[in-house]
Amino acid sequence: MEGSGAGEGLEWRKATELNGSQKAAENPIIPSCCRKAMSALPEAEAKLHATVVSGWFSGHRCRSDKNDKPLYYNNPMWPGEAHSLMVEEILYEGKSNYQEILVFKSSMYGKVLVLDGIVQLTEKDECAYQEMIAHLPLCSILSPQNVLVIGGGDGGVLREICRHRSVKHIDICEIDELVINVCKIFFPALSIGFEDPRVQVHVGDAVDFLRNAREGMYDAIIVDSSDPIGPAQELVEKPFFQTIAKALRRGGVLCNQAESMWLHTHLIQNMLSICREVFNGSVHYAWTSVPTYPSGVIGFLLCSTDGPCVDFLNPVNPIERQEATVKHKRELKFYNSEVAKF
Ligand code: SPD
């Protein structure tokens, strides 16, 4: 990897350099697990992220004690459970100003990106997430032109948005430049999204970015965030949704990563009720199957602002029309107009 063009400040370690163990709120109606997940973790606890133990990555947080024995901690987002993946090789381990970044090669799902101990994507099942979060909103409106992506530093959502020929400009606001750089090295099939000339990258805080965005500027905003612990905490709060609604044109759409209906019912209910207050058009919840995410599913909050009515279940801008005219190097693997009706 040395001299690979990863860029300055890319802090990384080769697998050979790793030691053995590394290789290996206040609302009473919200239960404590969700309350804890919605609030920032104590600094000491937040440092205990998942590592690889005895050749397995586990989606709970873990560190080794001084005798190299693993110590396990519940992840407050999904207490009492963990999903493990067999690790063939650790490809990258680093720490940015915001989070710990891990890339490894798994035996069954290809390469895996992990942030602060939580799986963000695997090569095998990323299509189900990126295709849905991008095409559910973009296919629900006619001729989307200006799109904003919040998060999404791996580039997969950009890759999908770029299928839409009507799109003229895509802003992406990602807080962590190291995630972008690491993905450009290890996940080229996703980071290809950054190569489209319509894409403009802004490294920074999404809340600030939106505060300064021109009113009514975007046809669609896609929030591809990590879970609401750490850097993404503010992205589930009312002021954030208010700035999104303001940045959307009339009849514009939001698609927001919205966790698992099996694990985060209260968080989802909370987000839905905020969005029903903030958005005057449609508010809808959709979901997709991603086997490497906790509980195997993840949801999306779909909202539209006041203006032309948006029916998320019946796409007026079907993806099949795009695909019929321009042949993409990469075929869609998951999304189609029928899947959108679920
Ligand atoms: N619980 C994990 C949620 C991850 C959502 N973001 C994934 C980024 C893929 N572009």
Image (cartoon, rainbow, N blue to C red):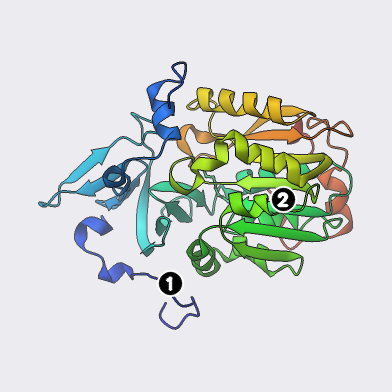
Nearest the eye: 196 or 19: 196
The residue at the far front in this view is 212
Q: Residue 133: which quarter of the image?
A: top right
Nearest the eye: 177 or 62: 177
Query: Dot 2: within a 10 Å radius of its alpha carbon, few (fewer than 14), some, or many (20 or more) residues?
Result: some
Q: Who's the residue at 60% across and 29% down the image?
A: 271
Nearest the eye: 324 or 265: 265
Q: Is residue 72 visible?
A: yes
* Image: 57 above or below 280: below
Labels 1 and 2: the sequence-earlier one: 1
The residue at the far left in this view is 67
Question: Given the image, on which type of amino acid does mark 1 rest?
Answer: Leu
* Image: 49 above or below 261: below
Q: Is residue 151 visible?
A: no
Q: Residue 34: which quarter of the image?
A: top left
Q: Who's the residue at 70% across and 30% down the image?
A: 278
Q: In the rendered view of the protein, which quadrant contains the C terminus?
A: top right
Q: Circle 1 sits on which residue?
A: 10
Instruction: Give the image location of residue 17, x and y in percent.
Output: 26, 70
Question: Given the image, on which type of amino acid does mark 2 rest?
Answer: Leu
Nearest the eye: 207 or 113: 207
Q: Who's the residue at 56% across and 59% down the image?
A: 204
| Disc 1 to disc 2: CB gap under 8 Å | no
Residue 119 falls left or right of residue 160:
left
Query: Dot 1: within a 10 Å radius of its alpha carbon, few (fewer than 14), some, or many (20 or more) residues?
Result: some
Instruction: Give the image location of residue 175, x and y in percent.
Output: 54, 57
* Local secondary structure at mark 1: loop
Q: Circle 2 sits on which residue?
A: 332
Instruction: Give the image location of residue 317, x and y in percent.
Output: 87, 43
The residue at the far top in this view is 29
Q: In the rendered view of the protein, which quadrant contains the N terminus?
A: bottom left
Residue 170 falls left or right of residue 290:
right
